[in-house]
Image (cartoon, grey):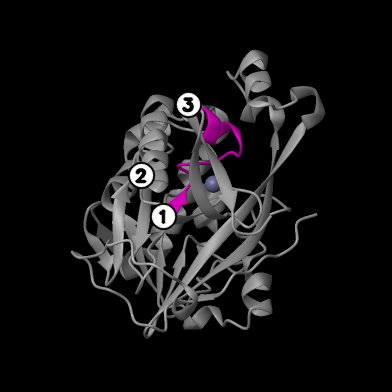
Amino acid sequence: MLTRRRFTIGAAALAGSLGLGSRFGASAASDALTTLSDGHLEMPTDFVLRGISAEVLQEIGVDRGALGTTLASPCILTLHRSGDRLVLFDAGAGTNFMPSAGKLPESLDAAGIDPAAVTDVIFTHAHPDHIWGVLDDFDEVPFANAAFHVCQTEWDYWRSDAALSEMPEDRQVFVIGARSRFDAIEERSTLFKPGTEVISGIEAVAAFGHTPGHCAFVLHGADAPVMVVGDAIINDPISFARPDLAWAADQDPETAARTRTALLDRLASEKLRFVGFHLPNGGLGRVETAGAGFRFVPESA
Ligand SMILES: [Zn+2]
């Protein structure tokens, strides 16, 4: 049901410096950003919207009755070419999470990209749809030559005793799955801290709440920086109109709401381009203020 959407924007086509990036290495003029579909998730509507009242939905203009019992949530990975680096943000769901997801290998193939050419995989967080794709059907890592980059907080969390003991039973497979992926990539992984450069020109930004160590990233391109927000902003239009709402999918909903509000403030005030992993219309766009909240302005409708 989803069409694959790819956006390759050469730096030459981008206009207007935002004056960012002084602390971080500017990237080469060959910078290119591509988005790749990993398929989509199918989530029970009752779970996704748990705790969000009919009145609030009505205010935002969402017709709860028209949504049906299942919501499809696109999964969009970001691929960034900068100089001799080919950087993938997250690794997709792989084939063992949901039949509707795990389509990254086909998307890479259609884009003419050999997974072995990926030099770096940087994770926003370790939920299944973002990390299970580091193992293929043969339990091998398809990104044969990549270095992996994981936030220290995220790494420590999923490996902690608390992760398993505090996780609801129906989500304990998330912990088992994250640990087995971390084990598979451990020797090739570097742990980073938010506020630092993960690799040249890519700044990690703490965006905690969805998971304990969830991070966003600013790609300091030649002229126009782009932020990869992962799952910090998950739903259009609800997350934009009411960033303060608590979501069942967020492990710490209050922290996630604060993070979401701060990110939206920044994206709107800096007119920053960004990619949201689960947002519609290709996931790439900008944010505008709208009333007391915000709205998503996708680059491709
Ligand atoms: Zn996700």
108 or 131: nearer the viewer: 108
User: Residue at horizontal 59%, vertical 58%?
Assistant: 299
Residue 28 spot, x, y in % from top left: 34, 82
The stretch of residues the image draws in magenta is: 228-242
Q: Amino acid at mark 3?
A: Ala
Q: Amino acid at mark 1?
A: Leu
Image quarter for residue 46? Answer: top right
From mark 2 to mark 3, how far is it between C-alphas? Answer: 15 Å
Quarter of the rendering occupied by the C terminus: bottom right
**Is residue 215 visible in this depiction of the protein?**
yes
Residue 151 numbered mark, or none: none
Quick check: is 238 in the magenta stretch?
yes
**Is residue 97 visible in this depiction of the protein?**
no
Count residues near mark 3 (Cα–Cα under 10 Å), then give few for <14, some for 14-19, many for 20+: few
Residue 230 spot, x, y in % from top left: 47, 50
Give yes or no for contact between labels 1 and 2 (Cβ–Cβ under 8 Å): yes
Q: Amino acid at mark 2?
A: Arg
Count residues near mark 2 (Cα–Cα under 10 Å), then give few for <14, some for 14-19, many for 20+: few
From mark 1 to mark 2, how far is it between C-alphas? Answer: 8 Å
User: Residue at horizontal 64%, vertical 62%?
Assistant: 37
Q: Which residue is mark 2?
A: 266
Count residues near mark 1 (Cα–Cα under 10 Å), then give few for <14, some for 14-19, many for 20+: some
Question: Of helix, strand and loop, which one carries label 1?
Answer: loop
User: Residue at horizontal 54%, vertical 52%?
Assistant: 277
Image quarter for residue 238? Answer: top right
Question: Of helix, strand and loop, which one carries label 3?
Answer: loop
Image quarter for residue 61? Answer: top right
Which numbered disc, 2 or 3, marks the residue closer to the eye?
3
Q: Which residue is mark 3?
A: 292
Quarter of the rendering occupied by the N terminus: bottom right
From mark 3 to mark 1, how far is it between C-alphas? Answer: 19 Å
